[in-house]
Image: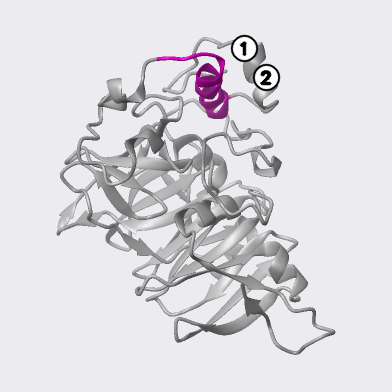
């Protein structure tokens, strides 16, 4: 396996116990499983004896400290990208069906292939004159774009190597605070309680994104790091029913069911699992938090499309991740078309 830092590294042998825990590919997930296996095989030092995992103080953490887990790699072991090289759509050589996280700001569109984000998770970039943080958590399947300005100051972010609810904890270089991606909130450090502004983005296929944004740019494979961007370090994780870190979630669906979540400013949340949308014919139009919304699932390309006011936060990821962070969320449940003309109901 390659080193998690730049350049080739020494191979690391997976233990037989780790192989028994989950027969998945190596890479970051292999390291994470090795840490999980160590916890299963025997007692170690109490977590309370490690007040600063990966060098981060958790003294004022707003979440239970014992639920903050080491993911495997150390701080910056998964290297974030800073203002990386981009290419025009004509110059790029990505397959039409490559999954990308796309964003458009100030009339400028840019796509970030998940094949690269799998290895880096965060990109500090500027699009349309705005300082953006592109984030992707492979364990939760969540691609989210934020404004990097906090209290008027532009921040830059790195990967802490820590997880909360199996979701990446980011940190900012300015205050060393830890930030939860899905909650968009700083959970420890001087910035605790502050929120990043979530911006509208879209998970799409490269061909689909190009057609909608013909002048788009796209992240180049020339990142400055030696990585095999043609191979996912997570193997078949997205298809596995296993969640490799302790998470409290609603078990009614397969944990990795693609799910589109909506969150209103008043705290209301609603989930649209892909299988429910398929049962409803692929699309539903309804009212959520007093607003008209439409959510569509493309079963062929396996991507969502959403039409909702900008005041509604949109998050796409795995069911278990949405459920863990929004335990009181309502859920769209399809009504068989043959029985009713209603688009669905909540449960």
For mark 2, give the secondary structure: helix
Q: Quadrant of the C terminus?
A: bottom right
Where, by quadrant of the figure, is residue 275 drawn?
bottom right
- 214, 102: nearer the viewer: 102
| Residue visible at 64% across and 59% down in the picture | 207
Q: Position of residue 9 (x, y in %)?
A: 49, 13
| Residue visible at 52% across and 51% down in the picture | 321
| Residue visible at 79% across and 78% down in the picture | 336
Q: Which mark is residue 19?
A: 2
Instruction: Determine the main secondary structure of the stretch shown in magenta.
Output: helix
Task: Measure the C-alpha gap from mark 1 to mark 2.
Answer: 6 Å
Label 2 packing within 10 angstroms: few (<14), some (14-19), many (20+): some
- Magenta span contains residue 32: yes
For mark 1, give the secondary structure: loop
Q: Position of residue 259 (x, y in %)?
A: 60, 60
Label 1 packing within 10 angstroms: few (<14), some (14-19), many (20+): few
- Residue 52 vs 96, above or below: the answer is above
User: Marks 2 and 1: in contact by CB < 8 Å?
Assistant: yes
User: Can residue 90 be seen at all in this image of the molecule?
Assistant: no
Q: Which mark is residue 80?
A: none
- Residue 333 vs 241, above or below: the answer is below
- The stretch of residues the image draws in magenta is 27-44
Where, by quadrant of the figure, is residue 110 drawn?
bottom left
- 237, 204: nearer the viewer: 237
Q: Which mark is residue 15?
A: 1
Q: Position of residue 258 (x, y in %)?
A: 63, 56
């Amino acid at each position: 396996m390659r080193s998690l830092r730049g350049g080739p590294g020494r191979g690391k042998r997976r233990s037989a116990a780790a192989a028994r825990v989950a027969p998945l590919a190596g890479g970051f997930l292999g390291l994470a499983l090795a840490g999980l296996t160590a916890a299963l095989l025997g007692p170690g030092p109490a977590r309370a004896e490690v007040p600063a995992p990966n060098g981060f103080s958790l003294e004022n953490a707003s979440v239970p400290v014992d639920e903050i887990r080491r993911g495997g790699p150390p701080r910056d072991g998964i290297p974030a990208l800073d203002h990386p090289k981009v290419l025009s759509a004509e110059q790029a050589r990505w397959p039409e069906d490559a999954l990308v996280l796309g964003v458009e700001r100030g009339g400028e569109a840019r796509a970030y292939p998940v094949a690269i984000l799998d290895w880096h998770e965060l990109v500090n970039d500027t699009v349309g004159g705005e300082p953006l943080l592109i984030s992707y958590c492979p364990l939760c399947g969540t691609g989210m774009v934020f404004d990097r300005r906090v209290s008027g100051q532009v921040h830059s972010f790195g990967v802490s190597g820590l997880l909360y609810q199996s979701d990446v904890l980011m940190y900012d270089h300015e205050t060393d605070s830890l930030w939860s991606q899905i909650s968009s909130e700083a959970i420890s450090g001087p910035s605790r309680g502050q929120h990043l502004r979530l911006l509208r983005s879209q998970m799409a296929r490269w061909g689909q994104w190009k057609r909608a944004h013909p002048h788009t740019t796209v992240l180049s494979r020339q990142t400055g790091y030696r990585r095999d961007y043609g191979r996912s370090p997570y193997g078949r994780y997205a298809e596995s029913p296993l969640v490799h870190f302790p998470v409290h979630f609603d078990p009614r669906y397969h944990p990795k069911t693609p799910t589109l979540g909506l969150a209103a400013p008043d705290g209301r949340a609603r989930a649209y699992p892909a299988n429910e949308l398929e049962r409803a014919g692929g699309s539903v139009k309804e009212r959520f938090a007093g607003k008209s919304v439409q959510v569509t699932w493309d079963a062929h390309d396996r991507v969502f499309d959403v039409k909702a006011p900008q005041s509604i936060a949109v998050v796409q990821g795995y069911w278990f991740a949405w459920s863990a962070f929004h335990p009181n969320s309502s859920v769209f449940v399809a009504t068989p078309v043959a029985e009713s003309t209603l688009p669905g109901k909540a449960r």
